[in-house]
Amino acid sequence: MDVEAAKMIGAGIAAIGMGGAGIGVGIIFGNFLQGALRNPSEAPKQFGNLIFGFAVTEALGIFSLLIALLLMFT
């Protein structure tokens, strides 16, 4: 197998993490919205946890994108 082809295949596999991050963000916000609609008085108390979960999930997606780009261009 050619080295360039292997790098592109590896980058494609690493980029799958971006899809996982998108699904994770959707689940986080969906569950927050469901909980906020059930108990609106507790929603402001949980907003910090929502933002923390969003940030961690997006960071993992960005890390997978970084690995994919490093595989493609190094």
Image (cartoon, rainbow, N blue to C red):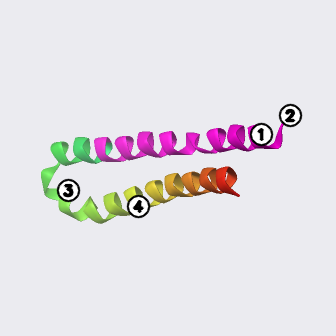
Three-letter amino acid code of the residue under disc 3? Ala
Q: Is residue 33 above or below residue 54?
A: above
**13 inside magenta stretch:** yes
Three-letter amino acid code of the residue under disc 1? Ala
Query: N-terminal of the two: label 4 or label 2?
Result: 2
Q: Position of residue 65 (x, y in %)?
A: 55, 52
Q: Position of residue 21 (x, y in %)?
A: 47, 46
Q: Quadrant of the N terminus?
A: top right
Q: Does 54 sit left or right of 13 as displayed?
A: left
Q: Position of residue 45 (x, y in %)?
A: 23, 64
Of circles 1 and 4, the one toward us is 1
Alpha carbon distance from label 4 to label 2: 38 Å
Q: Main secondary structure of the magenta part?
A: helix
Q: Which residue is mark 4?
A: 55
**22 inside magenta stretch:** yes
Specify the label residue 22 is tagged with. none
Check disc 4: other Cα within 10 Å, few if <14, some if 14-19, many if 20+. few
Of circles 1 and 3, the one toward us is 1
Q: Which residue is mark 1?
A: 6
In the image, what residue occupies the spot 19% across and 57% down? 42
Specify the label residue 1 is tagged with. 2
Three-letter amino acid code of the residue under disc 2? Met
